[in-house]
């Protein structure tokens, strides 16, 4: 049985029996949280756990599942770190289909095969061109550079956009280029842009490429010759970008990379299933539809999120997860205008968390180091609210957690 459930049951039993008064600090926190939560209405819920003392400090509708917006990224990144490891990297490689002659001429095509690196760009292309020219000794390509995104499906978005291009993030591809921004793509698909960039980089090094770039699938990966490769930043850094700055693009890219980790074609739907399976192993039961939280089908209860966050503290990848969270009043989304209330006060630097915002939805979950020295794990989820007003209330609760927890 999930340990959050056990604690809540114990709390319910204790309420029916004579017990000693809780510590005064916890009492003040309960009163502060209860007062603030009244302003959020019946569509809100909260769970505040003293993880050091194993005590539930305050709860209100903790089991009701709600749209959680970008708190979904907590489940995505936790699963990614567990499956791919904090030091794991995503490779983009060049494979040759053809024959390299003694003259340096490559009689065939070069396949640029993406592995899902969301940060693949100009510097990586230049490094691949260097390896092909200097290490592989290629002086001429009689075929062309072919962009291969077949490690994943070709859907450019998630369920919120019917798996087509989304207005809320750049198009998805296993072979991306410069974040797939419009200026970088120039009207081309991501694999077309990446293949064209490598063609140009080779020509700048004096390697003549006979034909123009195009997109296709490497016909036989096992039988192809690997000629060059570059790796992404370590997973801990990719996850850091995802959580601190709430990058929808990175979250969706990492979810597909999670899906492809077992060798199957990566997809959003399968990645969401993988993230759910990991969460369930830790005792949480969210409903996951994508990696970023854009779909309103992503739902969880405060108890699910607190269960996830509490259980992660015992895992080897926790330092990387902890380092990915925004620090209150210092960096990421908890230092931006909607949470200006955290720029001062006891919560500054003492709390870390993940925000979430959609129309009518606000969420904030994370950890605080209270003045008592205890670690407090919390989750506040609100639906049917003005998100800006809700964030001011979240700030008040987090300040109370840091002060009285």
Image (spheres, rainbow, N blue to C red):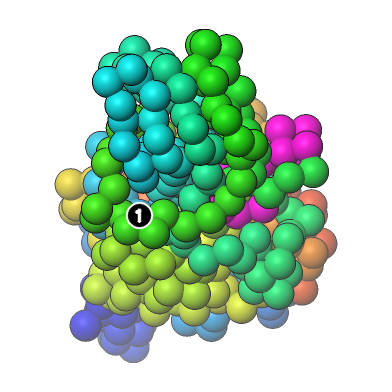
Asked if 27 appears above or below 127 in the picture, the reply is below
- Residue 172: x %, y % from top left: 60, 54
- In the rendered structure, the answer to whether residue 337 lies left or right of residue 110 reads right
**Residue at left offset 19%, top offset 53%:** 314
Judge by depth and name the residue closer to the eye, 91 or 238: 91
Q: Nearer the viewer, residue 95 or 270?
A: 95
Residue 177: which quarter of the image? Answer: top right
Percent x, y for residue 264? 34, 68
Does 49 appear above or below 273? above
Q: Is residue 269 above or below residue 75?
A: below
Which residue is pictured at 60% across the width and 36% down the height?
Answer: 211
* Residue 98, percent from left and from top: 35, 42
**Which residue bears the numbered disc 1?**
80
Crowding near pointer 1: few (<14 within 10 Å), some, many (20+)?
Answer: many
Seen from the viewer's position, the closer of residues 328 and 291 is 291
Residue stretch in magenta: 171-186
Q: Is residue 54 magenta?
A: no
Residue at the spot 18% in from the left edge and 47% down from the top edge: 316
Instruction: Look at 39% across and 24% down and name the residue there.
Output: 105
In the rendered image, residue 183 lying in the magenta stretch gets the answer yes
Image position, residue 376 (x, y; %): 37, 51
Give left or right: position of 222 versus 349.
left
Question: Secondary structure beneath disc 1?
Answer: helix
| Quadrant of the snapshot with the N terminus | bottom left
């Amino acid at each position: 049985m999930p340990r959050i459930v056990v604690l809540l049951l114990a709390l319910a039993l204790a309420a029916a029996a004579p017990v000693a008064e809780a510590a005064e600090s916890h009492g003040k926190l309960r009163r502060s949280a209860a007062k603030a939560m009244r302003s959020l209405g019946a569509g809100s819920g909260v769970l505040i756990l003293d993880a050091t003392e194993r005590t539930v400090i305050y709860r209100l509708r903790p089991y009701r599942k709600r749209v959680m917006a970008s708190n979904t990224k907590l489940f995505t990144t936790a699963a990614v770190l567990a499956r791919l490891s904090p030091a794991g990297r995503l490779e983009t490689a060049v494979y040759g289909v053809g024959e390299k002659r003694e003259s340096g001429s490559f009689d065939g095509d070069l396949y640029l095969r993406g592995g899902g690196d969301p940060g693949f760009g100009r510097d990586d292309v230049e490094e691949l061109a260097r390896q092909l020219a200097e290490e592989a000794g290629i002086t001429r390509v009689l075929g062309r550079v072919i962009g291969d995104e077949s490690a994943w499906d070709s859907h450019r978005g998630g369920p919120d956009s019917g798996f087509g291009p989304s207005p809320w993030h750049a198009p998805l591809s296993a072979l991306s280029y410069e974040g797939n921004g419009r200026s970088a793509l120039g009207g081309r698909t991501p694999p077309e842009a990446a293949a064209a960039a490598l063609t140009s980089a080779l020509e700048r090094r004096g390697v003549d490429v006979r034909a123009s770039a195009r997109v296709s699938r490497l016909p036989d990966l096992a039988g192809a010759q690997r000629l060059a490769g570059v790796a992404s930043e370590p997973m801990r850094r990719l996850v850091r970008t995802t959580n601190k700055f709430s990058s929808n693009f990175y979250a969706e890219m990492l979810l597909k990379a999670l899906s492809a980790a077992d060798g199957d074609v990566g997809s959003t739907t399968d990645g969401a299933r993988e993230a759910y399976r990991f969460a369930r192993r830790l005792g949480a039961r969210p409903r996951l539809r994508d990696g970023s939280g854009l779909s309103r089908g992503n739902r969880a209860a405060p108890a699910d999120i607190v269960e996830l966050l509490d259980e992660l503290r015992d895992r080897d990848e926790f330092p990387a997860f902890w380092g990915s969270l925004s620090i209150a009043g210092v960096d990421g989304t908890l230092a931006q205008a909607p949470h200006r209330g955290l720029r001062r006060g006891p919560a500054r630097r003492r709390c870390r968390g993940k925000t979430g915002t959609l129309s009518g939805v606000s969420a904030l979950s994370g950890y605080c180091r209270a003045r008592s020295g205890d670690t407090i794990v919390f989750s506040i989820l609100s639906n049917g609210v003005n998100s800006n007003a809700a964030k001011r209330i979240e700030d008040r609760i987090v300040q109370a957690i840091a002060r009285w927890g």
